[in-house]
Amino acid sequence: MRRDDHKCQYCGKKNVEMTVDHIIPKSKGGADSWENLVTACVKCNNIKGNRTPEEIGMKLHSKPRKPNHILFLKLAIGAMEDDWRPFLFMD
């Protein structure tokens, strides 16, 4: 959810109840992988159900990918004091 900025990857809403959705459902061979999991609001996840986005006519806002450790740290420590940034990140 942090990778997707807590935003539904189908409708784009934030600040609503979120779930983690398998783009390709597990019942259709979908894996528990970074590339097959996205943040989805409860409403979109229920609409999508046990189908692929293509089967239901839904589109993803962004292609899911495995985050690198630097991106993860930047998201996790977003409120860090500026004087520490030069030591941790190459901006």
Image (cartoon, rainbow, N blue to C red):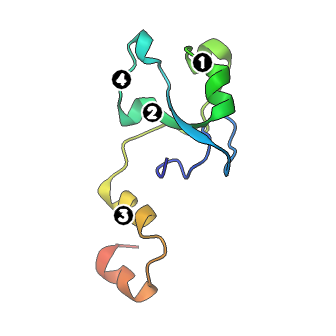
- In the rendered image, residue 40, in percent from the top left (x then y), is placed at 59, 36
* Depth check, front residue: 41 or 81: 41
Task: Give the spatial CA distance, label 2 vs label 1.
Answer: 14 Å
Residue at the disc numbered 4? 31
Alpha carbon distance from label 3 to label 1 = 33 Å
Residue in the image at 36% along x and 64% along y: 73
**Residue nearest the observer in this picture, 49 or 70:** 49
Q: For this view, does 76 lie left or right of residue 11?
A: left
* Quarter occupied by the C terminus: bottom left
Q: What residue type is labelled 2?
A: Leu
Pick whichever of labels 3 and 1 is earlier in the sequence.
1
- In percent of width and height, residue 56 lies at 66, 15
Which residue position is annotated with label 2?
Answer: 37
Mark 3 or mark 1: which is in front? 1
Q: Is residue 64 above or below residue 45?
A: below
Crowd around label 4: few <14 · some 14–19 · many ≥20 (10 Å): some
Of pointers 4 and 2, the one earlier in the residue sequence: 4
Q: Disc 1 designates what residue?
A: 49
The tag on residue 73 is 3
The residue lying at 62 percent from left, 41 percent from top is 8
| Label whose residue precedes the other's in the sequence (2 or 3) | 2
Q: Where is residue 19 in the image (x, y as percent from the top left)?
A: 55, 37
